[in-house]
Amino acid sequence: MGAITSRRNPLIAQIRALGSDGAYRRERREFVCAGEKLLREAAAAGAEVTVIISCSEPDTSRFPDATAAQVTREVLRTASPFNNSRDELFVCRMPDGPLAPGRRDLRVILESIQDPGNLGAIIRAADAFEIGEIIVTGACADLYNPKTVRASAGAIFRQRVVAMTAEELAGLRAGGVRIYGAAAAGGTDVRETALSGAAVAIGSEGGGLSGELLGLCDGTVSIPMSPAAESLNAAVAAAIIMWETWIWRR
């Protein structure tokens, strides 16, 4: 394909729609990523890249089957889901199912984490601290929202993430998995809780965990902090808990 100079080009319209419309992403089973670093991560993970557009001549050596086109800066801005557009955008095929289980047995349950940046940051931390599985439940942000993908810094291509209903979580607990809820205060010190083989549930930024999910918990854990602080951002709290369990497992 030759250089694209028109913002109305059908390929550009398709990329723009994938970046802005979650229903369209699910229908197409594709999502948008930005930047050479993420493209390298996609290649290393064996992700299926279907489209690459760039302000310079796209390098398709790693993805010979991808549709590739050079575009003007203006066209790239039109296609990009970000205000500060990178020099390169690409489209990936969603995997047919969840990735293989992770290297460790700890699970993290995310309930109604609505900010895609926080969701992506948690996925990134889970990959760093060898979390076996992230479980999303409730009204969580779209896993393939461009902001989620960008905040994951490539972990989206490696970290196992599954969706579960409240009924499925109850089945998980009935199968012997202990569930602990993260609480701002009043829970057992997370440093003193053996979490191997367990699941830690982290709630939304504003409301915390729902009563239904708390009802499934075997207990709650808290992160010691200054009494002057009310709470932590969900992504920060998740990262601290995952780091603590990683250190404990080592």
Image (cartoon, rainbow, N blue to C red):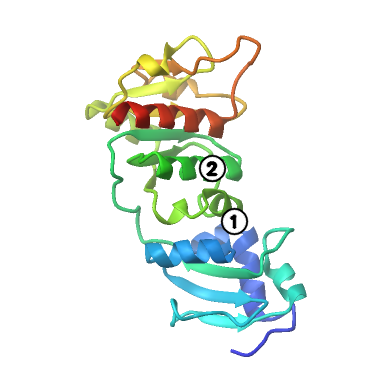
Q: Is residue 146 above or below residue 220?
A: below
Direction from residue 84 to residue 246 in the image, left or right: left
Q: Can residue 62 be seen?
A: yes
Type of the residue with mark 2: Ala
- Reading the image, the residue beneath label 1 is 146
The residue drawn where x is 62% and y is 70% is 88
Amino acid type at image mark 1 = Pro
The image quadrant where one finds the C terminus is: top left
- The one nearer the camera, 99 or 213, is 99
Residue, disc 2: 121
Relative to 216, 121 lies left or right: right
Instruction: Please tell me in which quadrant of the rendered image residue 146 appears.
Output: bottom right
* Residue positioned most to the left: 175
Q: Residues within 10 Å of mark 2 (few under 14, many from 20)?
A: many
The residue that appears at 54% across and 34% down in the rendered structure is 235
Residue 13: image location, x then y, percent: 66, 73
SS label for mark 2: helix
Q: Position of residue 51 (x, y in %)?
A: 53, 75
Distance from label 2 to label 1 (Cα)? 13 Å
The residue lying toward the viewer, choosing from 101 and 15, is: 101
Q: Is residue 248 left or right of residue 149?
A: left
- Report the disc number at residue 52: none
Q: Earlier in the sequence, mark 2 or mark 1?
A: 2
| Res. 48 image quadrant | bottom left
Q: Is residue 199 above or below residue 139?
A: above
In this view of the protein, can residue 29 be seen by the observer? no
Residue extending farthest to the bottom is 2
